[in-house]
Amino acid sequence: MTQETLFVSDLHLTATRPEAVRRFLHFLDRRVRGIERLYILGDLFDAYIGDDDDSWPSRDIKAALRRTADSGTQVHFQHGNRDFLLGERFCEDTGVTLLGDYAVVDLYGTPTLLSHGDLLCTDDLQYQAARARVRVEDWKRNALSKPLWMRRLYARGYRLKSGLDKRSKTYDIMDVNPDAVTEVMRRHGVSRLIHGHTHRPDVHDFEVDGRNCQRFVLPQWDGREWALCWGREGFRREKIG
């Protein structure tokens, strides 16, 4: 077992992006198996409509995650804004461990906060209101009670609406709020944060209460993506082959 931990997010896998699906399956089978841990920090799917959906590519993704978990690699997942309906059956089928919206992990001796990142975009009031509405259990149960064909139609409409909404918002509104970042890092007592969601990959150095801190932003999978690879010697950005 290689002492490495990999982080990815915002893959947005869907049947309309078969090449991205192929890269992810190859990544799991050829790169991830045999390492210590993989963290998927949300939006693995472009629109996840329930654990009972066994259409392609969901079934192939589940099978590949199962092979990865069975190899001894720990696979952890956080909900994103596109796949928050992913539930217990998915975890049972794949061997994936589901994390909360914020999770502190020991990354080779350093407590590190993980999040999808959408909760940090506090300036986007429209999105935060919609998020709060759909994350309650009653809303999710009602959505999952609909037949699959109806959920597929809803997912298509959601993707269209999401694209239109983004056109009317500035990049600053859709980015994280610095005060929100400071508050959450202070609350969890960490000096390192890893997240996705914003599609603005970078490493940010800053201070919180006189402590040197870092914020790592993961990229979306658009053909130029990389995984954040961490070992005892530090980190590197590794291009997905």
Image (cartoon, rainbow, N blue to C red):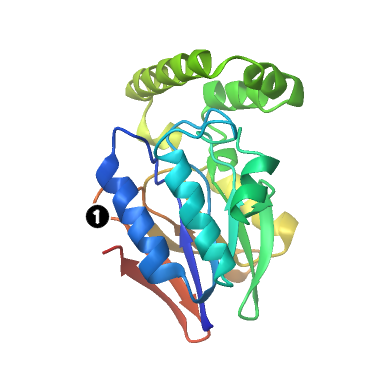
Residue 95 rendering spot, x and y as whole percentages: 63, 57
Q: Mark 1, residues whose alpha carbon is within 10 Å: few (<14), some, or many (≥20)?
A: few
Q: Which residue is mark 1?
A: 224
Q: Does residue 74 appear left or right of residue 166 in this picture?
A: right
Q: Does residue 236 appear left or right of residue 7 in this picture?
A: left
Residue at position x 60%, y 27% from top? 131
Looking at the rendered image, the quarter that the C terminus falls into is: bottom left
Occupied quadrant, residue 158? top left
Residue at position x 69%, y 48% from top? 100
Residue 61 rendering spot, x and y as whole percentages: 45, 48
- Secondary structure state at the residue bearing disc 1: loop
Residue 234 rendering spot, x and y as whole percentages: 47, 81
Looking at the rendered image, the quarter that the N terminus falls into is: bottom right
Q: Would you place residue 190 above or below residue 102 in this image?
A: below
Q: Does residue 48 appear left or right of residue 203 in this picture?
A: right
Q: Amino acid at mark 1?
A: Arg
Q: Would you place residue 170 above or below residue 161 in this image?
A: below
Q: Would you place residue 232 above or below residue 97 in this image?
A: below
Question: Is any part of residue 62 visible from this angle?
Answer: yes
Instruction: Tell how many labels.
Output: 1
Question: Is any part of residue 44 visible from this angle?
Answer: no
Residue closer to the observer: 32 or 209 = 32
Residue at position x 67%, y 52% from top? 99
Occupied quadrant, residue 55? top left
Residue closer to the observer: 130 or 87 = 87
The single residue placed furthest to the bottom in the displayed view is 233
Occupied quadrant, residue 109? bottom right
